[in-house]
Image (cartoon, rainbow, N blue to C red):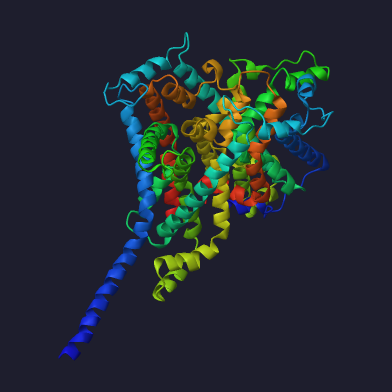
Amino acid sequence: MSAADLITSPPAREPARHSNLTRVVIYGLLLLFAFVYLIPLVVMVMTSLKPLDEVTGGNMFALPHHLTFDPWVQAWGEARIGVSDTAGIAGYFWNSIKMVVPAVAISTMLGALNGYVLTKWRFPGHKLVFGMMLFACFIPFQSVIIPMAVILGYLGEIGNSLIDATGYAFGFGNPTVNLVIVHVIYGLGFTTLFFRNYYEAFPTELVKAAQIDGASFFQIFRRILLPNSTPIIIVTVIYQFTNIWNDFLFGSTFAAGDSSPMTVALNNLVNTSTGIVEYNVNMAAAIIAAGPTLFVYIVGGRYFVRGLMAGAVKG
Amino acid sequence: MTVSVAPTVVKTTRARRGLARQRLQNLLPKLVLAPSFILVLVFVYGFNLWTFFLSFTNSKAFASTHLVGLLNYRRLWDWTFQSDPPSNWYTAIVNMGLFGGLYVFFCLVLGLTLAILLDQKIRGEGILRPIYLYPLALSFIVTGTAWKLFLDPGIGLEKAMHDWGWTSFHFDWVVNPRMMIYCVAIAGIWQTSGFVMAMFLAGLRGVDGEIIKAAQIDGASAFQTYRRIIIPIMRPVFLSAIIILTHMAIKSYDLVLSVTGKNPGGAAELPSTFMYSFTFTRNQMAVGSTAAVIMLMTIAAIMVPYLYSELREKGR
């Protein structure tokens, strides 16, 4: 049983018997904690539904007096982000989508193939290869961003000369393409880890039998492993989606201005020092930025937790 | 003759073709793995070495190859002890200790408390558990934005308390440069403690029921059972949690910027923000790389032994 399944299963042993008073204390504490975890989100939502004077003049815990959806409309299509001319966070939201979808798809596919090779087609040194890919998950990205910036700078120059020669850059120097490359590379460690641990438990006999029947490397992968991989694919996709959507360091370093992803735009919006701070608009933008990952969490919570646990290397 | 030769020729080419196919089949797995491995080799290990190299140069706004020996390391070493006026690096180190210590400690305490409370056959566990875990789905920028508003003395907690009649309540940490780092810790603990809860909960549910039954028969109270039996059994979970949390603390970057509003005056400096500002805004890339190398070494010192032991256990 995996660690995540343990969480969702009730305790196997007899529960400790508690007096009624202890029960009350336990429930009281649990509810208090639930309140503490929920309150920042509740305050965010309520603030985003109030007019600005009610935010600055009223109590943040008070329900909206004049319920308004204007801050949401403003955040989505009208608010000025930093020094950019484009209005609202809508464009940045799509930037993030355009970056996340290919990055998640490619890194998950490569992770599945890597996991397959590392468990079913072992070669001398497979452990070292896996160990090296695993450690890559945990490096501080500060130790790679300078070289990465240099390389992406070169790619941009190639793109410029391609434009001179052919009028088209073929994706070279495109910030979204750059971020996809970066996220695929630095996500490979985790996706490989997930699939390797999953395929480790997959019966090798089935693979051997198919091999004897003459099935090729890719046939075995497509016909035998992939159809049985749905849970781990969901786990990996959710994990990668959350991580890449929430990334800030790479986004702020390699994509500037109008091509920034959502998190960078949100930070620029919230921390702009000019003019009055429109807290209600900021909060609406923050909820929009959190929306996709929260949605994924609510829909696929069980898989989300499994990914987290696997990311802590506990299989 | 020609008739008798032809089949053997066919046979040998077929055999040869079969052999080549066999060889390709044997090579194929490695060919499939190779691109990923090469990417990791170049973009992780190669780049780490590149950064390591830069830390010995005098790179300013652009990477240079002019070597200056250990000069950058000596500089950081001197700054480590320059407390009056505090150098950015000194602030970063002190804040790292404060933030890291509080973050790891309170995540562990809260995580363990929640896990133990949830493990008492609670009705509605399926509703409570996701509530403790949802902050993990948020980006640090969103978390920081929420907490910055929540703790803002002008419109947040302090204002609300004043409205409710507690006029002497004072809490301005989020705008007070000396206390900002504690707000970063609060937001970080709020975000991550649910994760630690999940780790501990998995650990608790994995404990053999027979041992606990035996303890209960011997007359141990619930508290004693946890203190003397269950928590010691969970030592490996503690170790994993501490290691994962420490490495997350060292990598914290976005949270600082969003809680403090772009880290005004470097008040909430951490090694990660130090590295970034020296490299990209102060044009001292060599110093930035040196800080990056120190971060990498610290994380490697924690993670490598951990991953090694994890992999070895799995191999058994």
Q: Residue at x 48, y 35 (%)?
A: A250
Q: Residue at x 44, y 59 (%)?
A: A116
Image location of residue A9, percent across then percent down:
67, 54
Question: Which of the 4 image quadrants contains residue B264?
Answer: top right
Q: Nearer the viewer, residue B89 or B279?
A: B279
Asked if residue A97 lies left or right of residue A203, the reply is right
Quadrant of the rendered structure where residue B31 is? Answer: bottom left
- Quarter of the figure with residue A287: top right
x, y percentage for residue A36?
A: 72, 33
Residue B112, can we see it?
no
Identify the image quadrant of the C terminus of chain B. Answer: bottom left
- B22 left or right of A47 in image: left
Query: Where is residue B155 drawn, in percent x and y?
Result: 74, 20
Q: Looking at the picture, does residue A196 appear above or below residue A214?
A: above
From what the image shows, is residue A43 above or below residue A177?
Answer: above
Task: Determine if residue A183 is in view.
Answer: yes
Residue B158 place in picture, x, y as percent? 74, 19
